[in-house]
Amino acid sequence: MRGDVYVIEGHGVSPLLVPRRAGAASPDSVAALQLSQALRAITAAHPDTKDVRIVAEARTHYQEVIALMDVARAAGLANAALEGAGDEPAVPGGGS
Amino acid sequence: MRRRRSRAAGMMERYTSDGGLTLTSMMDILTTLLFFVLKSYISGGEVTVPPPGVTLPRSTVNAAMHTSVVVAIDHEDIIMGGEKVATVREALATDELMIAPLAKKLEEARSQMDEIAQRKGEKREVARLATIQGDAGIEFRVLQKVMYTLDRNGFPDIELAVLKKA
């Protein structure tokens, strides 16, 4: 999550930007659909990939983090790690 | 004299048995066992409803909760085992990711779990699972500090409690 966009990045994946309503409790339906399609395309191309790193801003709502974990899980990325947008280490997100 | 004797005999009859266990004794034993089992279960962690004021986020996930140490976060406080450990304001007051009062409380919980495991004779390392019951509206920086503190204090497996979306 970066300001007013969701950024999808990864090894061998072209960065993709999806518009985001900053401060919203969760992605709107259009953003959720775009994120879902992008992540599904990635998991289709890399079927062994199960890990996802969700990088949230300090003031991101917890509900939005959970919503993104849901989108990722639905796309086949079940192992989520949460990380702050600064330089903090990733912490496993566990099962929600 | 006769009356006193017959009364004593009556009492003897009432309190002697034929050698088998009476219902009262059986109930005492069962109650003691029940308390023992409950105590062991509770000491190993807890599965609780979120405290008042915590509205869990909604999720599509469909997984059961496990018995674990529970840390609840609302807009004001960080609560562990139903007891307020620190305020959110205190946690955010420093740049440190570690929340010291929570770390202390986790250390106590960890040593208690280890002691119980030792008494039970368990040789395997105790699974240290923690569940965060965070209010949907809290900021990620609070959640991050709590997760970091859990991870660095012997609870690397963290579950996030959610409400299932209808």
Image (tube, coloured by chain):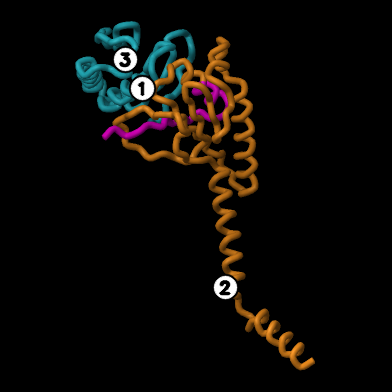
Report the chain shown in orange. Answer: B
**Marked residue chain, label 2:** B
Q: Quadrant of residue A42?
A: top left
- At 48% from the left and 12% from the top, the residue drawn is A88
Residues packed near mark 1 inside 10 Å, few (<14), some (14 to 19) or many (20 plus): many
Q: Amino acid at mark 1?
A: Gln
Q: Which residue position is annotated with label 1?
A: A63
- At 48% from the left and 26% from the top, the residue drawn is B73
Up-down: is B11 above or below A62? below
Residues packed near mark 2 inside 10 Å, few (<14), some (14 to 19) or many (20 plus): few
Q: Does B159 lie within the magenta span?
A: yes
Q: Which residue position is annotated with label 2?
A: B23
Q: Which residues are magenta?
A: B146-166
Q: What mark, if any, has residue A24 been given in the picture? A: 3
* Of callouts 3 and 1, the N-terminal one: 3
Mark yes or no: residue A45 visible: no
**Residue A89, horizontal then vertical, whole percent:** 48, 15
Mark yes or no: residue A43 visible: yes
Q: Amino acid at mark 2?
A: Leu
Q: CA distance from mark 3 to mark 2?
A: 63 Å
Q: What mark, if any, has residue A79 been given in the picture? A: none
Q: Does B124 lie within the magenta span?
A: no
Q: Are marks 1 and 2 in contact (CB under 8 Å)?
A: no
For residue B24, side relative to residue A30 (left or right): right
The hue in which chain A appears in the rendered picture of the protein:
cyan
Up-down: is B82 above or below A75? below
- Tag 1 and tag 2 share a subunit: no
Looking at the rendered structure, the secondary structure element under dot 1 is helix
Q: CA distance from mark 3 to mark 1?
A: 9 Å
